[in-house]
Image: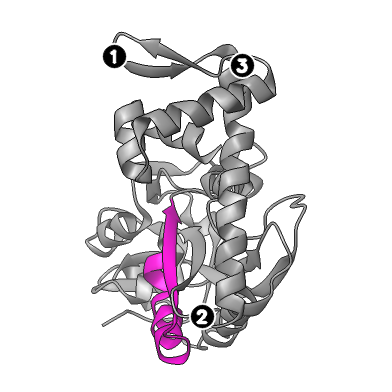
Amino acid sequence: MEYLVAVVEEQSFTRAAESLNVTQSALSHQIKALEREVGGPLLERLPRGVGLTPMGRAYLPHAERAVRSAGQARRAARAAAGAEGGELHVATLHALAVGVLPPVFARWRQEAPGVRLQLHEYGTTEELRDGMERGIADLAVGPRPDAWPGPVVPLGEEEIVVVTSADDPLAARPGPVRLRELADRAWVRCSLEPVVQGRRWLDLVCERHGFTPLTALETGHSSTAVRMAAAGVGIVAAPTHIARATRGAAMVRVDPEWRREQTAFSRVDLTGAAAAFVRLCADLVFAAEPDAVSPCA
């Protein structure tokens, strides 16, 4: 299976053999043996490289999961023992990777230097879930996945606030703002915005308050959206940890509060290094927010 996955990824028997450090004849022999076992051809030679047959396309996703699961099992065993060279693969959203996880990784390097961390970043919760279902990582940190079949550990909540420029009159408000008061304001929207019930999250919550949000700008990343809001392009809904890291941004709480649960989840029970990493996340991130929400330095 590992050889099949390598050939598909490289689209070449020669390059796959080189990446696996085996001879091309040995690689071809193993692929033929696999095809005899499953009862038909999995690969076909094309004018430019190698492609999958219909049988191969059906077989490949299962082979990929099996290969990744085997690698995950080896990593978990070595990491559980604290073995030098052990690895722990962590998947998360880009916003969490740049916002709250750096202190966790830094502490991990101090406390478990023998277990190397590998970070896999995703733009959306859907991509994160898909990666975990395919066995990309040992555990994931992100919003609670719906109907997840494996263990899910609550880590805490992050607060979502309205971010604007420091000189915006909204930033001088002594208390929270009601969403209906923002009906005439233009928003900076991000393509990574969560989708709830098939709708973009901001559209859904604004509709519940009787209006459709005006759009000033569409961006590709949440950090860019917050910088645009800090510059006065429009207002944006964003986690406090991103806003605090943006110079010139001001944060205003919404009444009622916007909060989103964050969790750690995996396909198998969290043990050894994986369990230790989750405990570290719970200790260092998603702590109670400060009472005052004010312009950032």
Residue that appears at 28% across and 14% down: 48
Q: Earlier in the sequence, mark 1 or mark 3?
A: 1
Q: Quadrant of the C terminus?
A: bottom left
Indicate the position of residue 70 as horizontal and vertical percent values.
60, 53
Helix, strand or loop status at disc 1: loop
Q: Earlier in the sequence, mark 3 or mark 2?
A: 3
Residue type (three-letter) at the residue carrying disc 2: Ala
Quick one: label 1, few (<14), some, or many (20+) residues within 10 Å? Answer: few
Helix, strand or loop status at disc 3: helix
Residue type (three-letter) at the residue carrying disc 1: Arg
Residue that appears at 39% across and 28% down: 25
Indicate the position of residue 251 as horizontal and vertical percent values.
40, 73
Residue type (three-letter) at the residue carrying disc 3: Met
Residue that appears at 49% across and 27% down: 29
Asked if one can make out residue 31 in the rendered structure from this viewpoint, the answer is yes
User: Vertically, is 220 above or below 177?
Assistant: above
Task: Check disc 3 and report the residue beneath it.
Answer: 55
Task: Check disc 2 and report the residue beneath it.
Answer: 83
- Residue closer to the observer: 37 or 125: 37
For the magenta stretch, what is the residue range?
97-122
**Left or right: where 219 falls relative to 42:** left
Q: Is-magenta flag for residue 119? A: yes
Indicate the position of residue 235 as horizontal and vertical percent values.
37, 57
Asked if one can make out residue 140 in the rendered structure from this viewpoint, the answer is no
Task: Check disc 1 and report the residue beneath it.
Answer: 48
Quick one: label 2, few (<14), some, or many (20+) residues within 10 Å? Answer: some
